[in-house]
Amino acid sequence: MGLITMLIITLIVPLILAFISFWLPQMNPDTEKLSPYECGFDPLGSARLPFSLQFFLVAILFVLFDLEIALLLPLPWGDQLYNPTETFFWATAVLILLTVGLIYEWAQGGLEWAE
């Protein structure tokens, strides 16, 4: 009885919330809402200019190394395992792989801002 009730609630509540989120908001776009926001000033140019790929590259590298820190954060607890050398091996493999990738990116000139 409890499992069936939980399944029904799990199915019905998201459907109700999705239905409400699609039908409740009022879509009345006007020129003010569709214009780009620039700190209260009238826009000076097009807000749809393309970004340099350098920004995306730096963002991806940041996310990559941020994830690396998140993966290596529990490393001190790995020393308490039955075989800590295996933990050390995999952590070293991750660090070597990321270092080789960073060196490759640097050698290709992906980190240089000026051409």
Image: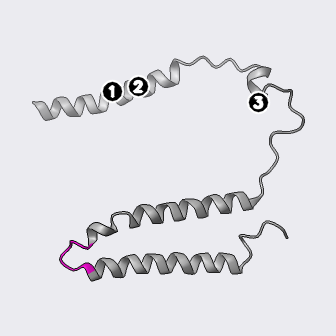
Q: Is residue 46 above or below residue 112?
A: above
Q: Quadrant of residue 57?
A: bottom right
Q: Is residue 113 above or below residue 21?
A: below
Q: Earlier in the sequence, mark 3 or mark 1?
A: 1
Q: Amino acid at mark 2?
A: Leu
Q: Which residues are magenta?
A: 79-84
Residue holding disc 3: 37
Q: Amino acid at mark 3?
A: Tyr
Quadrant where the N terminus sits is top left
Q: Is residue 91 above or below residue 33?
A: below
Q: Secondary structure at mark 2?
A: helix
Residue holding disc 2: 17
Q: Name the main secondary structure of what is drawn in magenta.
A: loop
Badge nearest the viewer, 3 or 2: 3
Q: Earlier in the sequence, mark 3 or mark 2?
A: 2
Q: Is residue 23 found left or right of 71 in the rendered image? A: right
Quadrant where the C terminus sits is bottom right
Density class for disc 2 (Cα within 10 Å; few <14, some 14-19, many ≥20) is few
Residue holding disc 1: 13
Asked if marks 3 and 1 touch (Cβ < 8 Å), the reply is no
Asked if marks 1 and 2 touch (Cβ < 8 Å), the reply is yes
Q: Give percent across and percent down for residue 107.
A: 70, 81
Q: Give percent across and percent down for residue 9.
A: 25, 28
Spatial CA span between label 1 and label 2? 6 Å
